[in-house]
Image (cartoon, rainbow, N blue to C red):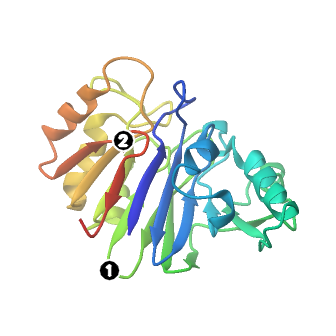
């Protein structure tokens, strides 16, 4: 399993970069998790738009879905100029009907629902879900290829259920929108202590901090996390690659 960070920023992208987006690949299958502002541009450094196999959306805040509209345009244009493309499935929760239907532009993209109790089979991946603590309905996801697994917390304040959900994962991609002295429980975000504590309790191999803040020195997030979690700690950055085989 190979995971490429397309967008590490929370809220909005820094200049020339992107908000939330992660390309997950295995055995020739290409899954995009979240599609925030700037993600489609970053994707094309790694993969043509027409080679995406599916998209998985955690929730409907703009920093996670802003580029779904231009993704539809990309598939439409590539279809018109000669590429024979199948409809691109975009999986998202159905609890905001207007937002869910906004992903539906057949025959180019098709909105498909998932629920927390579902177990999705997408190519080589099996995906399970956990509802998070966030102002809007949002889902964390665990992706396994049969041998390796990664967990993406999406947006959430600390939740004790994250540890069993992430247990033994090779990679935990945890939101970390706040510094260790800040309490994110009211706003639905975690700090570096929260993320590292989950990684430690879940006994994951690697912790990647993402959904980074636009203030302070983000290197402090990594330093603080390493005080708690003794495994590998990565600070998400545009183009960063994690590979289960390396």
Label 1 vs 2, first from the N-terminus: 1
User: In the image, is 15 to the left or to the right of 83?
Assistant: left
- For the image, the number of numbered tags is 2
Q: Quadrant of the N terminus?
A: bottom left
Residue 64 x, y percent position in the rendering: 61, 44
Q: Quadrant of the C terminus?
A: bottom left
Label 2, secondary structure: give it.
Answer: loop
Which residue does the image show at 55% across and 44% down from the upper left?
42
Residue 21 x, y percent position in the rendering: 53, 48
Q: Callout 1 environment at 10 Å: few (<14), some (14 to 19), or many (20+)? A: few
Res. 163 visible in picture = no
* Res 178 → quadrant: top left
Which residue does the image show at 38% across and 39% down from the upper left?
237
61 relative to 54, above or below: above
Residue 209 x, y percent position in the rendering: 34, 42
Cα separation, mark 1 vs mark 2, equals: 23 Å
Q: Callout 2 environment at 10 Å: few (<14), some (14 to 19), or many (20+)? A: many
Res. 174 visible in picture = yes
Disc 1 vs disc 2: Cβ atoms closer than 8 Å?
no
Label 1, secondary structure: give it.
Answer: loop
Circle 1 is placed at which residue position?
147
Residue 236's disc number = 2
Report the front residue among 162 and 144. 144
Report the front residue among 209 and 158. 209
User: In the image, is 90 to the left or to the right of 175?
Assistant: right
Residue 168 x, y percent position in the rendering: 25, 68
Residue 239's disc number = none
């Amino acid at each position: 399993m190979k995971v490429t960070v397309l967008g590490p920023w929370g809220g909005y992208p820094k200049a020339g970069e992107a908000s939330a987006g992660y390309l997950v690949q295995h055995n020739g299958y290409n899954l995009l998790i979240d599609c925030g502002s700037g993600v489609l541009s970053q994707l094309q450094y790694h993969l043509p738009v027409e080679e995406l196999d599916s998209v998985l959306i955690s929730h409907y805040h703009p920093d996670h879905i802003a580029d779904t509209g231009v993704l539809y345009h990309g598939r439409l244009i590539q279809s018109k100029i000669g590429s024979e493309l199948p409809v691109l499935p975009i999986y998202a929760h159905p609890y905001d009907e207007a937002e869910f239907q906004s992903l539906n532009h057949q025959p180019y993209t098709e909105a498909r629902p998932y629920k927390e109790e579902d177990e999705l089979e997408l190519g080589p991946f099996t995906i399970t879900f956990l509802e998070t603590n966030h102002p809007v309905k949002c889902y964390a996801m665990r992706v396994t290829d049969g041998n390796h697994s990664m967990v993406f917390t999406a947006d959430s304040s600390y939740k004790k259920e994250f540890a069993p959900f992430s247990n033994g994962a090779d990679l935990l991609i945890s939101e970390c929108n706040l510094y260790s002295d800040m309490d994110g429980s009211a706003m639905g975000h975690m700090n570096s202590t929260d993320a590292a504590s989950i990684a430690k309790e879940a006994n994951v191999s690697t912790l990647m901090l993402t959904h980074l803040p636009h203030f302070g020195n983000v290197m402090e997030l990594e330093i603080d996390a390493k005080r708690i979690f003794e495994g590998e700690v990565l600070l998400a950055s545009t183009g960063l690659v994690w590979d289960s085989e390396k």
